[in-house]
Amino acid sequence: MSGEGLPSPGDGVAERIAEAIRARTELRPVAGIVLGSGLGEAITVARERAGSGDAVEIAYGDLPGFPPPTVPGHAGRLWLGTIAGSDVAFFQGRIHFYEGHPMALASLTTRVSAALGARTMVLSAAVGGLDPSLVGGSMVVVRDHLNLMGTNALAGWRFPDGSPAFVDVAGVYDPALSDAALRVLREAGVEAADGVYAAVAGPAYETPAESEMLRRLGATVVGMSTVPEAVAARALGLRVLGLSFVTNAAGGAVSHEDVLLASKTAAEAIGRVVAELADAF
C-alpha cells in the first residue's frame, strides 16, 4: 500500500517499523492479526491447522518506536509466517490508550500492517458481556461499535492536502468476513453471536450502573481496545474482522487474572478462524 491519498498522523513511526521488518524477512503479510490478553496460543492453533514454511518472530523492543506492552498476557512480539498459503502478521499484544500512550500509538498495529501492504485486520480482544444472554466463554463477532473513549483514533491525522481525516466509518466491520467467521465458529461448536462493541478508556472496569448504561445504549460487549485499530483500518482502506471473547458479565467482580485464565480457552477458536479464512484475507 503506497499510502497515496490516505490520511496519516504524520509521525513516521509505522513507516520506520515497517522498514525494520522488511529488513528481517521477505514475508509480505496480507493481514495483520492482533491477539488480545492471553490469546497468544492462537498462533499455535492456526499453524497446526494450516501453517507452512519458516516463521520469523521479532520482539516489539527490537522495532524502532514500537513501545513494549506493559499489560500481563501481552507478550510483545510480532510473528510473521504463512497460514493457508497467505503470509500473515500476528501481533502478540497491543498498545492501549489506558497505558498512557497517545491514540496514534493505540492504532499502531493497524498502521504497521497497512505500511507492510496488508489488506485486512483481524482484531481480537477479551471483553465483558453486557447482553444477559451471553455466557462466559462465548465469542462475539463485532458488527458495529460505540466509541466512548473520550477521543477519536484519527484525531490529529491529516490527508496529504492538510485537511482533517474526515472518514466514513459507517461500515467499519466487513460483512463477508464477519459472516464467514460466525459460520466457522458455529460449525466448530463454539457458542457464538454477533453484536456491538463499546470501547471505554479504562483501565478501571465498569461499575454496575455504567454497564447498564452501555447496555441501554445498544452495546453487546465492552472492552478497552479494538476501536482505535478498527477506525484506523477503515481510514487506511483495510477490511476489519472483530472477534471478542466474553470473559465475564460486565459490572460484576473481575480481575485481570480472571481475564487471562478465561481467554486461554478462546485461543483455539480464534486460531481456527484465522486458519479457515486466511485465503480470504
Image: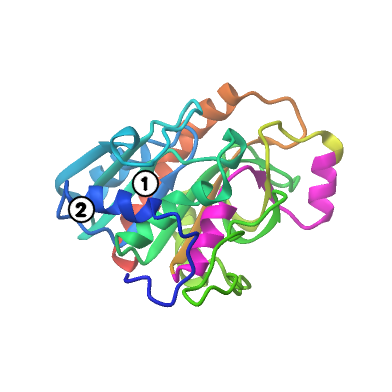
Residue 60's image quarter? top left
Amino acid type of disc 2?
Arg
Magenta residues (range): 210-237
Which mark lies nearer to you, 1 or 2? 2
Q: Specify whether 208 is left or right of 18.
A: right
User: Mark on residue 236?
Assistant: none
Give whichever of 84, 199 is nearer the camera.
Answer: 199
Give whichever of 270, 14 is nearer the camera.
Answer: 14
Give whichever of 119, 151 is nearer the camera.
Answer: 151
- N-terminal of the pair, mark 1 or mark 2, is 2
Q: Which residue is mark 2?
A: 22
x, y percent for residue 57: 24, 38
In this rendering, is residue 214 above or below 120? Answer: above
C-beta proximity under 8 Å, tags 1 and 2: no
Q: Residues within 10 Å of mark 1 (few under 14, many from 20)?
A: many
Q: Quadrant of the N terminus?
A: bottom left
Q: Which residue is mark 1?
A: 271
Residue 47's image quarter? top left
